[in-house]
Image: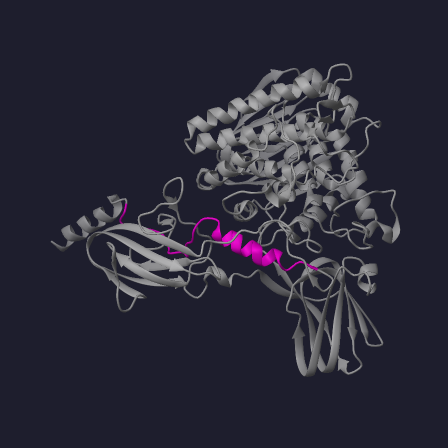
Amino acid sequence: MRIQTFLITLLLALVCGRAGAQGAATWIWYPGDFEIWLSNKMQAQRVERDVAWPPFWRLYSHQPQVNFARQVDLAEPEDIAVTVEGTYNVAIDGRFVHGDQRHIEVPAGKHTLNIQAYNPASPPAVLVQGKTIRSDASWTVGPRPGMPAPGGAVHAAHWNFDTADNPPSHYRLATREVRPTAVTRGDHAILVDFGAETTGFVKLKNLAGSGRVTLYYGESREEALSEAGAETLDTFTLANHRGDFTAPTSRAMRYVNIRLDPGLRVGDVTLLYEYLPVAHRGSFRSSDDELNRIWDVAQRTLELNTREFFIDGIKRDHWVWSGDAVQAYLMNYYAFFDSDTVKRTTWALRGADPVDMHINTILDYSLYWFIGIRDYYQYTGDDGFVKTIYPRMVSLMDFVLARRGADGMLAGQPGDWVFVDWADMPKDGELTVIQLLFARSLDAMADCAALAHDEAKAATYRRLATELKAKIRAAFWDPQRQVFIHGRKDGKTNPLVTRHPNMFALLFGYLDDAQAAAVRRNVLMSGEVPKITTPYMRFYELAALAESGQQAYVTDQIKDYWGGMLRAGATCFWEQYDPKVQGAARYAMYGKPFGMSLCHAWGASPLYLLGKYYLGVKPTQPGYAAYVVEPNLGGLRWIEGKVPTPHGDISVFADTRRIEVTAVAGDGVLRFTSATTPRSKDGAIRHVADRRYEMTLEGGKTYVVERAD
C-alpha cells in the first residue's frame, strides 16, 4: 500500500503542470528591473576628474511594487521558506497569511500563491524554497494580484542568485589581487605600472600617517603624470591611519601616479583587479604572429569591457551604449558566448515604458537595438528571451514609426542625436545609412513578431521593410556611378559618396551581384572615398568585404590598422586610431589631451572577423540548429581555432592542403574550394560548382579533407 501511495504521489508530481518547480529555487523579479537598477548604479559612477557625470539621457527606474503569483496543486501540505527584498505580504487564495511570513505551510490541494513586494531602493525580489514550490521562471509577475502586465501574463526573470544570503541587490563583480610590473618611487610620489590596461581598486599596503593622498590614473604614462590633465583621480584625507588602504571605487588604468603628503608613508602597491568571470572559449592562431597578437589583445579588450554589462570603454564613459553593445555581442559570440551579459545589456539599454526618446538619445542606436536582438536569437536560439522582451520592442518601434516623415523615412528630430560615426560629414536630413538601418530593424521586428506569434504585426513590419527598401533604391542609388549617395535634405539629394551606406547595403545583402561588385570597387576598395578612422565603422566595412569574399584584402587592413595600434604601444585597442597622429597627441579627443579611450569595446572586432570569416563558422538556423564551416585563409599559410556554440566548440584547422573540423550537434555543412578533386575518409564530398565542394558534418565527429587550394 505504501508503494502504491508513493507511485501515485510521484505520478501527480510528474504530470501536474502546476505542481511546482522541479529545479533549484532562485531569486526572481520583474523582467528588466534588475538590469535597469544595476545599470543606473553602474553608469552613475562616471566622473570627469573629481566631478560626477551621470548619463545625459533618461534613466528609467525599476518598479517599486510587484506581485509574484504561482498556481500549485499539492498532494500533501508543504512548508515553504520565503525571503523577500522589500516589504511584503503573502496571500493564499486571496487571504493574507498572518504571523510568521518567512515560514509558511501551504495546505494540500489547488491554491493560488501571491507575494506582494514593495522596495523603492532595489528591485522587489523573492526567493521561495520548498519541496516542490520553488521560485523560478514559472512564476508570473504583475503590478498587483489578478492584474497581469500589459500584453498578458509575464513570467519572472532570474539569473544566478540562489541562496537567501545572496540577493540580487548584493551583486558584485569578482576581484583578485595583482601586482604591478614596475614601481618608481620619488619624493612623496610613486608611479606604478601594471604593465597593461586593467581596472580595479588600488590597494596601498602598510599606509601610515596623516595627510592627503591623491591617485592620478592613466591609460598612458603621460596621462598619469599629468596632474592637471588626468581624466580620473581620487583624493583621500586620512588621520592617524595604520594598515592597508583600498580605494573604494574601481578605476581603469595602466598607470597610477600616487602623490602623498609628507606625513604619509606607504609600502607596496597592488590592485584588486575587478572582473566578470567569463570562459575564454573562442581561439584563433595562424601563420602570422602579428595577427595572433591582434586576436589576443582584442580578446583582452573585450574581456575588460565585459562587466555587469557590455560597456563602451573602461576609463572615460563606463556607460552602456547601444551602438557599442551590438558589436560587442557579435564579438562575444566568437570569444566567450556569454548570453547572460547580452540579455542584461539589452534590457538595460531599453529601459521601461513609456518611450519618449531614442536609446542613448541617438536615432541610429535605437535601430541597432532591434538588430542586436535578432542577432542574439540567431546565435543562441533563445526564443524565450525574444518573447519576453518583445512588448518593449513593439513600444520602441511604435516610437520610431511615429517619427517618420511623409515619405516613410527617418530624419533627426529635435532632441535626436544622429551619430553614425565620428566622421566629418553632414548628418541632417534623410541619410541613406539611417534608412538602411531602419529597413534592417524592420526585418528584425518582423522575425521577432513571428516568434511572439504576433502574425498581424509581423506582416506589417515585413511590408514596411519591403516598401522602404524600394524607396531607398529609388531615392539614393546612383545608376551612373553605381553607388549609394549620402542622402537628401528638404527634397534635395546630396551626391556625396561615403562608405557608410554602401557598406551596410553590401553587408545586409540589399544589393544584387553587379551592384555589390560595383560598391566594392567604387567605394570600399577605393582610395578616392574618405577612409574611416574609428574601429567602430571599420567593423562593418571589413565585415561587408569579408562577407563578399575579400578576406585577403581584409587581412592587410587588419594588420595595417590594428597592427598599427600595437606598434604604437597599445595593450588594448583604442576608440580611434589615425596613423598620421604621433606621440602623446594620439590620446587627445573631445578637446581634451587624454580624452580618448585606450580600451574601447568596439576596437575588438578582429574577434568577430577572424572567427566568422576566416575560421568560417556561422549559424544558418537559430542556435546553430544548422550551421556552416567555410574556412578562408585570407592569404595566410594556415589558420586554426575554436568557435563556441550552444552545443560545444567547433574546432577548425585549415592550410592550403588540408582542412580538419570537429563538429557539434546540429546540421553542419563544410564548404571549401579545391583546385583538384578533394578526398576524405570521413564523409561524402559533394561537388556544387566550379572548384566548390561541400560535406555534411555530424556532431562529435572529426573530419579531415585533403585538397589543393
Q: Name the residue rendered at 37%, 41% in the picture.
A: 152
Nearest the viewer among 34 and 357 is 357
Residue 311 against residue 222 in the figure, above or below? above
Residue 271 against residue 56 in the figure, above or below? below
* Residue 37 placement (x, y as % from top left): 52, 55
Residue 416 against residue 74 in the figure, above or below? above
Q: Is residue 146 left or right of residue 678?
A: left
Task: Report the number of discs.
Answer: 0
Q: Name the residue rendered at 55%, 29% in the picture.
A: 442
* Residue 351 placement (x, y as % from top left): 53, 47
Q: Is residue 26 magenta?
A: yes
Q: Which residues are magenta?
A: 18-47
* Residue 316 placement (x, y as % from top left): 71, 55
* Residue 288 placement (x, y as % from top left): 76, 40
Residue 666 against residue 12 in the figure, above or below? above
Which residue reaches farthest bottom? 240
Which residue reaches farthest left? 1
Q: Name the residue rendered at 58%, 61% in the picture.
A: 174
